[in-house]
Image: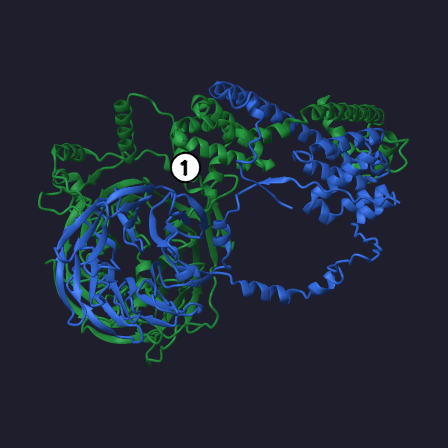
Chain colours: A green, B blue
Amino acid sequence: TKRVGGAGTNASEMAADGGSSSLQLPCVFSPKSRQFLALCAQDGRLRIWNTDSKTLHQEYVPSAHLSATCTCIAWGPCRTVKEGPQRKKRKSEAVQVEEKADLLAMGTAAGTVLIYSTAKGALHCTLDGAHSGGVNCVQWHPEESLLYSGSDDTNIVEWDLQTGKTRSKWKADHAAVTSLCVSPDGKLLLSAGHIIKMWDLDTKEVYRKFTGHSTAVTTLRFATTRPPDSNGLYFLSGAAHDRLLSVWQVREDGKDKNSVVSFTLTDEPQHIDLVTSNSKEEAVRLAVVCKDGQLHLFEHFLNGPCKKPLSPSCTVQMSDTKESPIPIPLLAAVLGADTRTVMLAYGSHLQPVMEKVEINTAERHVCLTRDVQTTLSLSMETTVSKVKTPIVNAKSKVLVPGLPGHKAPLKGTSQGSEKRKKDTDTKEMSIAERLGEIDLSTVSEKGASKGTASLTTDNFAVLLVQGLESNDASILNKVFQTRKEMVIKKTVARLPLSAVLPLVEEVTYTFVLSYRAALMVRWLKAVLMHHTSYLASLPDLVTQLGVLYHMIESRVKMFHKLTKLDGKLYLLMTQVSANICSVVHSIISFNLTSQELSLSHKERMSLSSPHFCSYTPGSCEAVKTQAEKFECCF
Amino acid sequence: MASFKPTKIQVYPKLGEKVTQDTLYWKNYKAPVQIKEFGAVTSIDFSPVTPHNFAVTAFTRIHIYGPFSQEPVKSFTRFKDTAYCGRFRSDGQLLVAGCEDSVVRLFDVSGKVALRLFKGHTKAVHLTDFTSDRYQILTGSDDYTCRLWDIPNATELTTYTEHTDYIRCGVTSKLNRDLFITGSYDHTVKLFDARVEKSVITMDHGQPVESVLLYPSEGLLVSAGGRHVKVWDLLKGGQPLVSLKNHHKTVTSLALSSNGQRLLSASLDRHVKVYNTTNYKVVHNFDYAASILSLGLAPDDASIVVGMTNSILSIKHRKNQEDSKEIAGQQRRRPSYRVFVKGKNYVPKQDDYLVSKPVKEHLAKYDKQLQRFNVSKALDTALGTYIRFRKPEITVAVIKELDRRGTLKNALAGRDERGLSQLLNFIIGNLVDARFTPVLVTAAEMILDIYQSVIGQSPVVDRQLLRLQDLVKREIEFQKDLLEVLGMLDTMFASSLPRKESASASAPTVDPFPTCSLNTDS
């Protein structure tokens, strides 16, 4: 079903796909202990959440977080960390230093790689100067302190973190390198550009090539550790807009042209976690979170090709607790030590909720319900331990949103910015606070509290004037559909004098349509009330309003007769209902005597209409419903 | 024997838009041909020579369409970026276009590759035009300059740097080879004279100028920008004549009808307005599906071409008299005129003895039934589905006729549940119509009188009676409101009365109909 890569794809297509896949926000759990979740949200901030306490652990704003957005994150291997200097003094604690996930590599769209240290809570170092295009992926070497990054400029760079310099750099492909993966033993590197290539890391030579994906490959993972016989090495790949994960076998004889196994998903993969198998007897466990927010769990023994695509052993969805449930998207999932526990991150990127869940994998489909609202309303202000904001120096260029080429008004840094700097040193203001401040200032300036209603009527008046000027039916419709008396009154009151006569004309015109007339009367009344003096001052008032007057007059001519008809109808209908009343009475008395609540049709017919010769069963129903109504009354 | 008089169907006046010469003229177009272009259509220009092909600039292409083709007869695709403002020379041989990459290209209409490239601007060129001597080109760009170029040796002649913002529109004089006008986003329209190498007149439009247009006489200039269309008198040194504000979004394009009597403006609010150029009143209005960016009008108003932001080009062709006749002929062959007038036009001579033959009268079905006094059946016929929904005035006329004869009671009586509910449905549907109320109220009262003994038996009829009751209640409420309004109007008329006491004592009853827009609709 797949096209052979390279045959029908061109570079621009690949680039376009890569671009769309980079919209996925990077979201990674720290290795081993799963203590942290690193998440880069839309606003370019890196947030590290503690999965145990479910609170924000650290927040870091890269200095160029808007122009050089973070495209990928990778946790470095766990290492022993020296604690901060003040802690070092306590000898009792210094003894029990544990291995902790510390370094975090972030690739940016500007082509730099930032190394952030969670232990320090600050930027460790910046690796730059090697890429001319945006970085698409970063991968750590499992043992040595090496880092690999793949970029849009088609190169792979090997960084030495001891020195912070590039160790080697080579051209990997014709197209942008979209994904990388280092094998668990650290000897092989997979790269995906136009095609998937396997590199020998010692010699930096291509070991194997694999073709098969037509869109940009977003995920590469080794599924097994390298066994003694080379036939047992498998890896996994997923691509943008592709609902299949492909498994490839690296074979001794080199006959590895096509993927051996594929896993079906419901959407393109967003986050993958995998427990590698070390032997043939051990199954590979896989947790895939798709773009549509579903989690799929797979378990498969990898031994040779399997023709049919495999469907998940278990699918997990999440929804909220409302009456009409809305799905909550899952962001990431990692597998626990045993087969049942899964760590989930879900909800919004700005404030994800982490949870360890036991899933009954015997069932194929599991739906979890969570109340996100309450969990989201937790205040986070106190839990933030360290928040860093960029320090802007005087030389830095400030980009103002707007059209490029347009000279945006540049304002020199005034005292205001200094003030703000002082504030931000301690804590950054939240959006809500800022809004509140803005609100207060406007109110105090104008000195009058303006309700929201006035705002809407203001818009309505503008809309109405525009609609009358351009004679636009859709706008006028929108305005005239209002039913609120207040809105109508205020709109008319705000109307400029020049628009009054056109409005009257428009009202006259729409008056013919009977279904609109009732609403139009309100408008007419409002106009007459608010602009009496203006209208009365018009010399040709009679000709202006004559049509309207005649139309109204002809309509109210029948008022007398209509009222009479109403009286007649009223009398008859009350009599009818009184009749039904008496029927109900008899039914109730019958019910009481026979102690039987449900009546057959025949019985009721005999009760309600003994003297009517023709009676339809439908009428029984009507009587029944009416009888029920009256029962309620009693 | 007195002949039977057919039921008189009342013709009611209908309030509506006034039918004028203009609406007839501008409505006389066929259904639009819609063509999907590659991007937003930014410019449409008609060739000045027959067969009046037109160049459509959309995204990186310029397509030339013939007057009746729906496929481009020619297309220029050699643009590296978005093309702008493809314009024909006055002989229709050459075409010039600007581009986002700041290069101006000159094409031979029959060729494919650009004949000349004019390089010199530093930003996108949105305005290109030929001068009337046909050997020079005017260009205006986003680098705030407009330039004159020599076509034969592709050199720049003059640069004008008077504007302080993007130059997005302009036009050259057709009478004088040295005059041209540019409109800019700095809110000004400037008239330049190449002989003195600077602007001669500057007009402040007040908004970024999107389009300018010269009258054929070149005494008047029209500029569009923001929501305004403004007319300037050039002979009086750029004096503003009129400011029109009939759009609710930015006006993007202007055109003049072939006789110069009507001005058209197109806007982002999806409307094209037609103005009378003698009093500058809107005489007609076209609606389109999306925001309009460009507008073109073929010579003799043979077609209206509109380019929109959703990259659709809409072409409306004028209906021909022959076309409509042909279609009518195909539809149905009627007996020829001769058959009807056979012998009718014979004028009797003096001595002839005239034997008159009774003219056979065609009667409608209900009339025939009325003639035979089948009153119930006549009413049933009048309540037939087509008449009931499409021509309720006939049904009402029949009920009225029955009432006049005094047989309405008979016609209404003796109906089963279905017949009665149909009748009530009709009454409910039309009772509030002021034209029908008097007749229908009488009928409703009669129905109640006849059927009051059996009310309560049928749930269908009961439900309808409840609906009727509800309707009547609402109508009464409404009429109460109306009476209040009437009271207000009376007061107002009374207060304005003293001024013209001499005119008439009973102002409200002065017949306003001659002045208002009433037209009878059969």
Quadrant of the drawing holding the N terminus of chain A: bottom left
Q: Nearer the viewer, residue B470 or A118?
A: B470
Residue A461: horizontal and vertical position, in percent?
41, 32
Decide: few, some or many residues near mark 1? Use Cα within 10 Å; few <14, some 14-19, many ≥20: some
- Label 1's element? helix
Quadrant of res B485 = top right
Judge whether B119 appears above or below B212 on screen.
below
Quadrant of the drawing holding the C terminus of chain A: top right
Residue B335 visible in the current orientation = no
The residue furthest front is B351
Question: Which residue type does callout 1 highlight?
Answer: Leu
Residue A234: horizontal and vertical position, in percent?
35, 69
Quadrant of res A169 = bottom left
Q: Nearer the viewer, residue A307 or A530?
A: A530
Viewed as shown, does residue B357 lie left or right of A436?
A: right
Viewed as shown, does residue A314 lie left or right of B136?
A: right
Residue B433: horizontal and vertical position, in percent?
65, 35
Q: Nearer the viewer, residue A313 or B243?
A: B243
Judge whether A175 appears above or below B294 on screen.
below
Residue A13 visible in the current orientation = yes
Query: What residue is shown with label 1?
Result: A463
Residue A564: horizontal and vertical position, in percent?
73, 23
Name the chain under label 1.
A
How many numbered markers are drawn? 1
Judge whether A463 appears above or below A236 on screen.
above
Q: Residue at x 13, y 53 (%)?
A: B198
Viewed as shown, does residue A411 lie left or right of A545?
A: left
Q: Nearer the viewer, residue B150 or B409?
A: B150
The residue furthest left is A395
